[in-house]
Image (cartoon, rainbow, N blue to C red):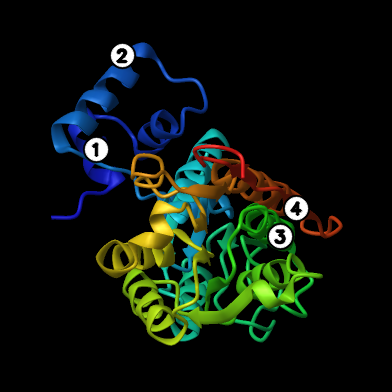
Amino acid sequence: MSLSIKDVALRAGCSIATVSRVLAGKGYISEDARQKVEEAVKELGYRPNRVARSLRAQKSRVIGLVLSDIRNPFFSEISRAVEHVAVRHGYTVLICNTDEDPKREAQSLKLMEEEKVAGILLSPTRANAKSLDPSVLPPLVLFDRKVAGAHLDSVVIDNEEAALKLTRHLLAGSYRKIAGIFGAKSFTASARIKGFQAAFAGAEERMAGIYQAPAFEDEGARVMAEILAKEPDVDAVVCSSALLATGAYKTLRQSGLHILKSEGFVCFDDPSWASFVDPPVTVIRQPATTLGEAAAELLMKRIEDPSRAVSEIVLRGDLIDRSAQPK
C-alpha cells in the first residue's frame, strides 16, 4: 500500500502542514510534535516522494549520468567521482548505460528529459550534434568525448598527446613493427589514432596496421588473433582501452608470448591485472576521478547559471612505465 503524508499526520495526531515542515526541516516545530512525526514516519516506514517534492519546489535534485559502457572500469571510476560531487551538492544520480549504441543513447536522453532531471552528464556514442539541442535538453555536459558541431561544456583527456607518448615508449625500444588496436569510430578513437600515427614521423616503416573494433573484450581478442594471422612480423602492440587490452592480452597469452616477454604490449587505462602480470604492462593512466569530479562540478555551474560561457577542460594522462629497464 502506498503511504502518503496524510497517513503520517493521522498516526502522529497532527496536521499535514506540521508533518511537511518536519520533513522539510523548515519552520518552527515544537520538540514534542517533531518527535511524534519522526516516530510515525519510522513506524509506518514512510519515505517522502522526492520527485513530487522537487516538482513542488520547481527544482529537481536529480542529475542524469549517461555512460557509453558501464562495464569499462574507467567509467565505473568516473561514476563514483560524479556521485561524490552530486551528493555534496545535494543531488542524487540517475545512471543509464548505452553500450555504445546511438539508439539507446537517444532513449536515455529522452528518459532524462521525461524525468525532468536538473542536468545531464553524457559520454556520447554519436559522432555529430544531431538531437543534442541545448535549448531543448536540460543543462548538458559532455565528458571523455566531444561531439562534432556541439557547442557544449566538455571535459576530455588530451587523447592525441597520450597516444603519442605511449607509442613513443615502444619506439624507444628495438621493436620493428608496432600495430595499433583502437575503438570503433568516435572522437576518442580518432584522436588516439592521430597520436599513434604522429609518433612514427621519420620511422614510418615501423608502423604496422591500424585496427578498429567496438571497445569490448571479445573484440580485442578477435582483433589480436587477426593481427597474429595477418602480420607475423608484428612484435609490439598499442591498445586504446582496458577492455580491448584485456581481450588482446588473453589472445597473446595463448599464442604470442614473444610480444609479452619483450614487453611489447602497452595500453590505455590501467586495468587491474596490468601491474601484476609478468612482465607488468606499461600504460597511460587516465585521471578518471579528476575527470568525473570536473565534469560534475561543471554541470553544477551550468545548472546554477544556464547562460554562462561554454567551458572546455582538457586533462592529461600519465605514462606509467613498468618496463624492467630503460630501453
Rendered image: mark on residue 314: 4
Q: Is residue 320 above or below residue 99?
A: above
Rendered image: mark on residue 116: none
Of labels 2 and 3, earlier in sequence is 2
Circles 1 and 3 in contact, beta carbons < 8 Å: no
Q: Nearer the viewer, mark 2 or mark 3?
A: 3
Q: Is residue 88 above or below residue 4?
A: above
Q: CA distance from mark 2 to mark 4?
A: 55 Å
Rendered image: mark on residue 164: 3
Rendered image: mark on residue 8: 1
Q: Quadrant of the C terminus?
A: top right
Q: Nearer the viewer, mark 4 or mark 3?
A: 3
Q: Quadrant of residue 210?
A: bottom right
Q: Quadrant of residue 310?
A: bottom right
Does 21 sit left or right of 186 as displayed?
left
Residue at the far top in the pictured view: 31
Q: Amino acid at mark 1?
A: Val
Q: Give the percent coordinates (x, y) of residue 49.
A: 35, 50
Dot 4 crowding, Cα within 10 Å, few <14, some 14–19, many 20+: few
Of labels 2 and 4, earlier in sequence is 2
Q: Say which of 5 and 69 sits in front.
A: 69
Point 21% across, 49% down: residue: 3
Determine which residue is flagged by label 2: 32
Dot 1 crowding, Cα within 10 Å, few <14, some 14–19, many 20+: many
